[in-house]
Image (cartoon, grey):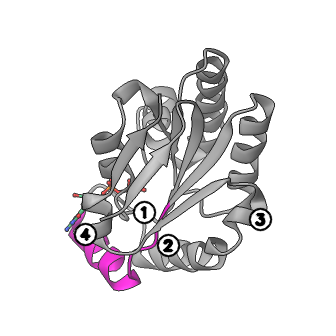
Amino acid sequence: MTTIQLPELCLVALVGASGSGKTTLARRMFQPGEVLSSDAFRVLVANDENEQSATNDAFDSLYFVARKRLARGLLTVIDATNVQADARRRIVELAREFDVLPVAIALDLPEDTLVERHRSRTDRPFGAHVIAQQAGLLRRSLRKLQAEGFRQVTVLKTGEDVDTVRVERQR
Ligand code: GTP
């Protein structure tokens, strides 16, 4: 079982393809206000968590709130796929802006598992090829996370890892 030790104040990036279990993990490990989810912000700005045209507005809003939280010294989690280097660069820059530790928790589940989950979901209108694309980006990202500036990197490789990982927060 993996235990992640988190400092009292940090900016946590969840990194993983759709269906890897980011939102489920975030719900289990963090308080609701601590988790800023791109899907939730798409709902807030456009009523639909799948509305891709709302992506920029959703992230602008997410970052606005993240800045308010970090300015208050509150741990913040960014629940988005974050499989693209650009998305992660923004997170590391934000952490630096507020002098907090950027932390990555990557969910690197087997692609078969992701595709299987995707097939059984009715709430994601895109095709399985999108999952494969995200999984490929994730795989190429994993060894770069540290060099990108994430000071603590945890990679969870199975559904069981994701279900059982624990977080200890330093006070
Ligand atoms: P996106 O929001 O699409 O990026 O996905 P996510 O990475 O946030 O995953 P989420 O936690 O929303 O879970 C995605 C789907 O996988 C949901 O329908 C869950 O019911 C399912 N799921 C999550 N964890 C598990 C698991 O441990 N086992 C199985 N079988 N399904 C799971």
Quadrant, the N terminus:
bottom left
Q: Is residue 118 rendered magenta in the image?
A: yes
Residue of label 4? 160
Foreground mark, 4 or 1? 4
Per the model, the C-alpha gap separating discs 3 and 1 is 24 Å
State which tag comes first along the sequence, 3 or 1. 1
Q: Is residue 105 above or below residue 167?
A: below
Residue 145 place in picture, x, y as percent: 68, 64
The 10 Å Cα crowd at callout 2, few under 14, some 14 to 19, many 20 or more, is few
Q: Is residue 163 left or right of residue 8?
A: left
Classify 10 Å Cα crowding around label 3: few (below 14), some (14-19), many (20 and above). few
Identify which residue is drawn at 27% across, 43% down. Answer: 28
Residue designated by label 3: 147
Q: Amino acid at mark 4?
A: Glu
In-image side of 1 versus 13 (left or right): left
- Marks 2/3: CA–CA distance: 26 Å
Which disc number belongs to residue 18? 1
**If you read the primary sequence from the N terminus, does the residue marked by circle 1 or circle 2 appear first?**
1
Q: What is the spatial separation of the Cα atoms under label 4 and label 1, in whole angstroms?
A: 17 Å
Magenta segment: 106-122
Label 1 beta carbon less than 8 Å to ligand 1: yes
Q: Which mark is residue 52?
A: none
114 drawn magenta: yes
**Secondary element type, mark 1:** loop
Q: Is residue 169 above or below residue 150?
A: above
Residue 122 x/y as whole percent: 24, 60
Q: Amino acid at mark 1?
A: Ser
Do the residues bearing badges 1 and 2 touch, measured as CB atoms within 8 Å? Answer: yes
Q: Which residue is mark 2?
A: 130
In primary-sequence order, the first of circles 4 and 1 is 1
Q: Is mark 4 within 8 Å of ligand 1?
A: yes
